[in-house]
Every structure is written in structure tokens, then in C-alpha cells.
Amino acid sequence: MNKTLRRVFSYARPYLIFFVFTVVFAAAGVALSLAVPIFIGETVDCCLGRGEVDFARLKKTVMTLSAIVCASTLFQWLMSLCTNKLSFMTVRDLRADVFNKLERLPLSYIDRRTKGELTSRVINDIEIVSDGLLQGFTQFFSGIITIVGTLVFMMTINVKIALVVVLMTPLSFVAASRITKATHNYYMKQSALRGDMVGIAEEMAGNQKLVKAFVYGDRAQERFAAINAEYGKIGAKATFFSSMTNPTTRFVNGLIYAAVGLLGALGAVGYSTFVGVMSVGRLSSFLAYANQYTKPFNEISGVFAELQNAVASAQRVFDLLDEEEIPDDSGKDQLTDCNGELSFRNVNFSYDPKIRLIQDFSLDVRPGERVAIVGPTGCGKSTIINLLLRFYDIDSGTIMVSGRDISTVTRDSLRSTFGMVLQETWVFTGTVAENIAYGAPGATREQIIAAAKAVHAHGFIKRLANGYDSVVSEDSGLSQGQKQLICIARIMLMDPPILILDEATSSIDLRTEQRVQQAFSRLLEGRTSFIIAHRLSTIKNCDTILVMRRGNIVEQGNHADLMARGGFYAELYNSQFAT
Amino acid sequence: MRPLLKYLRNYKKELIFGPFFKLLEAIFELIVPMVMAKIIDNGIANRDSSYIITHSLLIVLLGVCGLAFALTCQYLAARCAYGFGTELRAALYEHISSLSYTGIDRIGTGSLVNRLTNDTNTVQSGVNMFIRLAVRAPFLIIGAAVMAVMIDLRLSLIFFVVAPLISVVIFIIMRRTIPMYKRTQHKLDRASMLTRENLEGTRVIRAFSRQQEEIDEFREAVDDIAASSIAVGKLSAILNPVAFMVMNLGIVAILWFGGGRINTGSLTQGELTAFTNYMTQILLALVVLANLIVIFTKAFAAASRVSEVFALLPEENGTARPDFTAENIIEFRDVSFTYAGAGDGSIKNITFTLRLGQTLGIIGGTGSGKSTLASLIPCYYRPTEGEVLVSGTNVTAFDLDYLRRNIGYVPQKAVLFSGTVRENMRWRKSDATDAEIISALKTAQAWEFVSRMPDGLDTVVSQGGRNLSGGQKQRISIARALVGAPKILILDDSTSALDYATDLALRKALRSDLPDTTVVMISQRTTSLRDADKIIVMDDGEAAGIGTHAELVENCPIYHEIYQSQMNEREGGSNE
């Protein structure tokens, strides 16, 4: 916990000056605001009764009081400004760092986690760190100053009554921590239940059409009702416990107030041997302190609960930051002048050491050759692509591109020799033109339109509300096929020596696909290419076909050879025409 | 808001007694400074120690009663709010279940989920806060003012200057900060979106070597968040200090003028102390009131979003339950359909008849109306014009649950639910036996991989089915629709993730295992539809051709074009 805290504060180091100012201003602001009751008391003592008002002194104290009030206000405002700057800048740096990290993590890490979980670390966890640790710290600090300050002031007024107040301290502390603990427990239960409820709501109401299609409504409703009732019960308890805080504090305050009033008043009427003499004004300042004294205890125990949350969140963020990165390869050579030649030599690879996948795989591809990878659903066709682009690194063997071992050149230069269209389309939030020009940010509008026309996407893009300037995103209503066309147009703008088409046309309807194929054949002209496809007709003309099954390459050759062999490929090929 | 009030009807007692007890507590709280003033003025002035002791005990007693009243109120408030919330959610869920597809489309499923969970919660805490604070805060303000007036009318004028002044400060600052907070939240959402998109597109980003640009863009987004958080922070940081300053200056004024009043004998020392106390109380109550207004504004907005859902009429339902034995099992008579709010019709003048046990194929480009056509059969949508008849009865006259129970439907996107494979397979028929389930899985070519899983039918499907591949999900989704042998089966392009061999095996098994089932099959592959008894070629909402494979090859240019390309592929293949 200490280590995590220290690390969070190490992020705040560049803003140390704001930190120092926060502390200074907090101390000054709180101290001054604590001095206010003293002067109020002084003023009250200037007005003893009819004809007994010392106006000269009254004027002086009232002036001082006004000055103190204004100064205290100023310091508290400055303190807030510093805390804000401190916490928001720290959070900004932390977020930027985590995002930076995401770009440097191996794909194996990202593939194993859900996007929602990782996003939540960048956004929610860091938000909790900001609320709990940084802003909590200010609260904690001013709370401590308030407690110490009020004690000091009370001591200066009357040591004995102050001691009575101190003796009553555990009362407020115990009450506050008890309530906080019970509340925390119920809140944890409530938030777990809430998670379950949202889960059911998302699954059932989110798929309401399917629920209706299967006439599952009554059963879904029962499940929802059960969890809803439980949530209501626990929620009521959690809310009740948390709402006990204020009345209980008020009660404890009331007790201390009464005790101080009793002792102070007795002191004033002459039981001075026990409590000492006290003026009415001093009594009223003392009462004001007694009132302020207990409040921070509540805040501090609240801060502790939040602190625990924040440390847990910070830990999750740091866990991510501590993950092993892809080693920096900027010192390596650039892969330039790629001729499109490519080879695999005795390559072995598996995602999970327990499950062997690619074994002793060798392949030579001459410049301009077309290589197809085919096989049933989920046989690991995309693995080859993962290895070629070094999304994953091979366990042993070598992969050469243009005569260079790909592990000896920078990843960026290697990847820039490939143009890639994947089955899973990726459209980011931005205009259509920005999406198409993603790989060639300097492209002119004419080039973008030409690329879109080449893949027959111009027609639907023109029909969008703002044409090429329409903002699109993953769920902006574009069909899967339209998104795929945009991804293909992206490649059209680039001039990569090697192309990879991974089920690039799987979501496009047949008639459009045929037209897109023409564009592809122009693009493929003279380039080395890897093509993955269900529809075997599209890859028939490839120079080499790799047939994969359950992660292994079972056959390798051209279409005629493989058909003649009458093996798995022939079986796959014939099945698409069988009825 | 009004339609939601009826869910409070079981909590009338809480609604009345909650604020009542809170009021009692507030009254007691107002009395305490008065008692203290009495101690100072009578006890100390008369040196009456027994007076001091009894009145101190009175303060304790007031505290104890106050605590008891407050806790009672908090308890009633929590009970009422959560009771109300639970009933509201249950009713809302029931209402969502009763909506038609058109109704669901109008709000959108994502938004429905949001309204069901977040908005109901906001309304619920609105009720809670209403009971706890709506009476207390205004009462404390008015009460403190009244007490002040009773002590000294002229001095209390300061109250009537300070209280509005503080209100104005709070109002001006909050009116500016609330929209700023909203904008900051939007910026945070944007950073969240960027992160998500970045993770989804990792491969593309790395393949294009655009990491640095992504980092720069995110950096810009977080800079933006920091700048706008700091800007709003600057403004809202003024609020508390300035409010306290105004209050304290008010106290200064009270002391100054109070001094004069004491000198003339119209005010006592104790009363002056009480006066300053009331001033503090007013400020605290005003701050609470301001927050309360924010909470209520949010609750009202949430309530109106929830009411919007309640305002949608439930799906109309008929009573007809005919046997699925008519010779013309499905018939479309000049059917047109336009989605609510869309300008152009999605389906135009479709007429055809399908006989019992036959297979209907639907083919056509993206957006040509294939799925829409199929969705009219189980009456998911009602035709805008014309009639859809199932087993000779207009679908709109059907008991819709009965109609849908007899139709197996496989959506384009395979969605599985959290739970085991067995639970997913029981969606259509809650009491399906393992034998029925396995037989359906076998037909859908899914038993092979399900039986190989260590837990078989008990394999747990995580939410959204992330632990299964696309092809596996699709096959389970098909099998799910086959349990209990539906009279009509609709496959909405549901074999796209399957390779040809599996697709073929599936079609063969369907024909042999479910010989009496009428099948409606949407596909982009002509080979899949070749043996259908009737094929509809959809083009921009219209039927470009209806007939058998052989007829369409002859008469329908679009079908011919698609078919021709396949023939070419085939011939090309055999030529090599």
C-alpha cells in the first residue's frame, strides 16, 4: 500500500510546487478560519449589557474579524486552485502514460483481455485515484489541521474543558468508523448486486427482440424480478446506514456542545476551582470550536474508505504499467526497398506452450506470388499473419522478408511493407475521408475519392448525409459490408510491396464483391500477397495454397496439384458446389 | 413524472411520516441555541447552577430525541425510495417486455437498458432526498429567520440581506458550472471512446505504424480534459469560500449592530450568540438546498425519460391459435413495409405463397430487404400495406406468443446468453430434455464440438459468448431454434461464419431431421438455395424475381448474374 501511494505521489512530483502551496494555503486558510470564533467571542465580550458596550474595542475587533474572514476566504480559494491543478495534471500524466503503455504492450496481452476491462483502467480507475488519493489528501490534511487547531484554541481558552472534549473524542471516532464500515460493507454488496442487475438488463432488455422471438419474456422477467427485489432490500439498508452519518454526528456534536455549555456556564458562575473562570464571549467561542472539532472525524473516516478503493485502483493501473513491453527496436535497421520476397524456415509457434500449433513450417514465396491460406472455421489461419507482421514472435526458426530476418529490423519498417485488410473491420470515430486516408494522412480529396470509387464505395458514401465528411464510427449505422469497403479503400491509397487480405470481402454481398475483386486484381498485380478466404473460388488462381486444419498445415501446393491429390482441399473445394 | 407517482402508492405512510419526523428534528435543532442563550442569560447572569444543569440536560434530551427522529426519517426514506424504485423497475421491465419491435426501435435497446438501470436509480435517489431534505432545508432557513425576527426584528434585517445574497452567489456560480461539468464529462467520454477504439484496432494501428499519432491524439484529449476540469474547478472553487465569507461578514454585521442594540438594552448577550448561530445554520441549509435542486433537476429529467417508455403502447395481441396444417402455410398478399420514421419503403408489393413443408430461399444484396421480409412472418413488424397470412390466418390476428412459439428463428448475429449451453438450448422450450437438446445440436452440426468440451452441455457460456468462436456460436444459435421441432424455421443468413462443408452438412441434416418443418432461408450463397422450392430475389425492396432455381436462371437477370459467376468459378475449376 505504501509503495503504491509513493508511486502515485511520484507522478505528482512535477507539480510539487502546487503540492507545497496546497499545504501552505490549507494551513493558513484553516488556521485563519479557526481564529474567527475567538474574535467573535472577543466581540461578544465587548457587549456586556445595556450601557456596557465598549465601542472602541468593538470597532477594532470587528475590523480585525472582517480582515481575517477575507484572508481566510482567499487562502481557501487558492488552496482549491492548487489542489485542482495538482490532481488534474497528475491524472493527465498518468492517463497519457497508461495509454502510451497500451501501444507498447505485446498483442498477446491485449488479446487475452476484454477491451472494456482495459478501457476501465485508463478511465475509471484513474478517476478513482484522482478522487480518492489526491482530493482525499487535501480533505485529510485540512481535517487534521482543523482537529489540531481547534484543540489548540480550546486549550488556550480553557484547558480543563478542552480535556473533557478530548476525552469525548473516541465517541465521535467510534461512531464515525462504525457507520463507515457498515456502510462500506452494504455498499459493496449493493454494487455487486447492481452489477448483476445491469448484466441481466443488458442481456435481456438489450436483446429484447430475441427474447420476444423466443417467447422468453416471462422467464426473463422472473430472473429480473428476483434480482431487483434483492437489490431493493440491500440498497435500502446501504442507504439507511450511510444516511445515519449526519444525524449521528449532529448528536455527538450536541453532546459535546451540552457538556461544554454545562462546564463553561458552571465556570462562569463561580465553580472556578474546578473549571476556572470564563467569560460569556469565551464560552461562545469555545462552543463554536466544540462544534467544528467533531466534523473532521467523519470526513477522515470517509477518506479512509475512499483511500482503500483508490489504492486498489492505483494498483490495477500500476499492474498494467508494469507489464512487460515489447522491447524497443528503434536501434535496429530499417527494412527498405522490399522486393516482395518472403520465406519461412522451420518455424515453430504456439500461443500456449501446452498446445502445439505451427510446427517446422517452411515456405518460399517469390516476389509477386500469391499465397492463399484455406481451412475450416477456426483452424488458425490468421496465426500466419500474426507471425508475419510480428504481432506475435515465433518460438524458433526464421522468417525472412526481402532476404532479411524480420527479427533484425524494426517492427514499424517491417509492417510498413504490408498492406492489410482484416475480417474484423475497424472504423474509428472520424469522417469517412479520415478513415480512408488512415494509412496515407497526406492524401488529397481526389485520391481519396478515387480509392473509394475503385472499391465501389463511392456510391454509398455519396448518399451519406455529409458525403466524405460524414462522421462514422463502429456503431454509426454503417453495415458490416460498408465498413469493410472503407477498410479496403484504405489499402488502395497505399503502395505496399506485400498485401494481406484476411477474409477481406466476407461481409460484402456477392454482386459488390465481384466488382471489388476486379479492383483487387489490379492492386495485386506484381505484388506478393497472402489471401485468406472461405470462398475457395476466389483463391483458385493463387500460386501456392496452404491448407490448414486444427492449427497445422496439412497440405501445400497449387490448386491443380491439390485437386489431383484428392485430399482435404479437394473435399473442401467440392463441398461448396455440392447441394 | 405523473405516471410514475402511482408506484409511490404503497408508501404513503413513509411519504408523510418521513418528512414529519425530519421536521421534528429540525425544530429541536432550532431550539438548542435558544436554550443555550437562556443558560447564558439566566443561568450565568443569576448564578443559578441548578438552572444551568437542568438546561444542559435539556440540550442532551433534545439531542437524543433529534437523533431518534432523524434515524426514523432516514429509515422511512430508504424504505420508501427503494420500495418505489424496485416496483418502478419491475413495472418498467414488464412494460419493455410488452413492447413491439417498432416500440423497441423508437427508443433503442441501449437506451432502454440505460433507462431501466440508471434512470430508475436517479429517480429513486430523488425520492430518498425529497423525504430527507426537501422539508428540512427550507424549514431550517425559514425557521432560523423566524427565530431571528422573534429575537430582534431590526437586527434580523441583516438576515434578509445575507440569505438572498448567498442564494444569488450559489445560483450564479452553479448556473455556469453545471454545463461546464457536463462538457468535461463529454470530454472524458471521448477519451474513453479513443481508448476503446484504439484497443479494438490494435492490429490495424500497428500494421500502419500509427502508434505515435494515436498517442498524440489521446494526449490532446487528456490535455483537453485537464484544461476543462481546471477551468470548472477555478469557478466552483469560489463557491464555498465566498459563501462562507458572505456569511461571516453577515455575522460581523450582526456583532457590530448587535453591539449597539445591546448598549440600548434591546438585546442580551445570549441572544446575540444565538443570532450568530442561526446565521451559520442558514448558510448550511442554503448549500444543502442548492445541491437538492441539482438532484431534483436530474431526477425529473430521468423521470421523464422513464415516462417516455411507459408512454409507448404495448404490442397489440390477437387471439387466433390455428393449427399449422393449412396447405398454404405462408402467404404474402401485396405486402409493403416501411420502418417508422423512414422515408422509403423497405419492402414493396411482395406477393407469394409457400406450401407446408417447403423451403423458401431469399437472396439479394446488402440492404435489399431480405431480413425485413422474413421478420414479417413472426409478426415482429406489422405490414404497412397488404396482408401476411400464416396457416391461412392473418398474423395480426394471432395470439403472438403462440405464433412465435411455433416459429424457430435464427438471427443474423449469433447472440448467446450467460449460463450453460443447456440453459441456452432451453430458450425455446423450457422443459426440453437432454435427448431433445443433443438431437438439435446434432442437426446444427454443433454436437461434435460441444461433446468434446470438458463440461459438455454444462459448459458455461460467458456473457456474449466470448469463449466460443464465431462459427461455434452460430451453430449453437441454430440448434437453439431447432429444439422442439418448430413448425416454421427462419434462418436469417445464419451460416455466414460456417465453411462450405459444414454448411452443406447442416442443410442435409435439416432436411432429414425436420422433414415437416417449413423453412425460410436467407443466404448470400446461391448454392445454399439451389434446392429451395421457391426463391425470392430481392432488389431494393422489390422482388426482382420469384421462382425455382431453374426458372430464375432463365428469367431473372440479377439471379442469372450471380449464378453465372458461380458457374464460371466452377467451370474454371474443372478446366484446370
Image: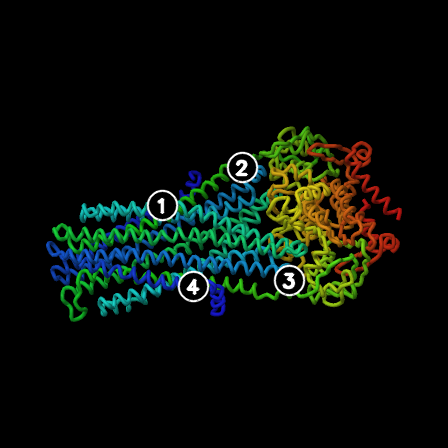
Chain letter, disc 1 residue: B
Three-letter amino acid code of the residue under disc 1: Phe
Task: Check disc 4 and report the residue beneath it.
Answer: A17
B368 left or right of B221?
right
How packed mark 2 is, by other alpha carbons closer than 10 Å (few <14, some 14-19, many 20 or more), is: some
Circle 3 or circle 2, nearest the eye: 3
Which residue is under mark 1? B171
Chain ID for label 4?
A: A
**Tag 2 subunit:** B
Q: Distance between the residues labelled 4 and 1?
A: 33 Å
Q: Are marks 2 and 4 in contact (CB under 8 Å)?
A: no
Q: Which residue is label 3 attached to?
A: A106
Q: Can residue B419 be seen in the rendering of this structure?
A: no
- The colour scheme used here is rainbow
The residue that mark 2 highlights is B314
Q: Position of residue B54 (x, y in %)?
A: 18, 60
Q: Are dots 4 and 1 in contact, CB under 8 Å?
A: no
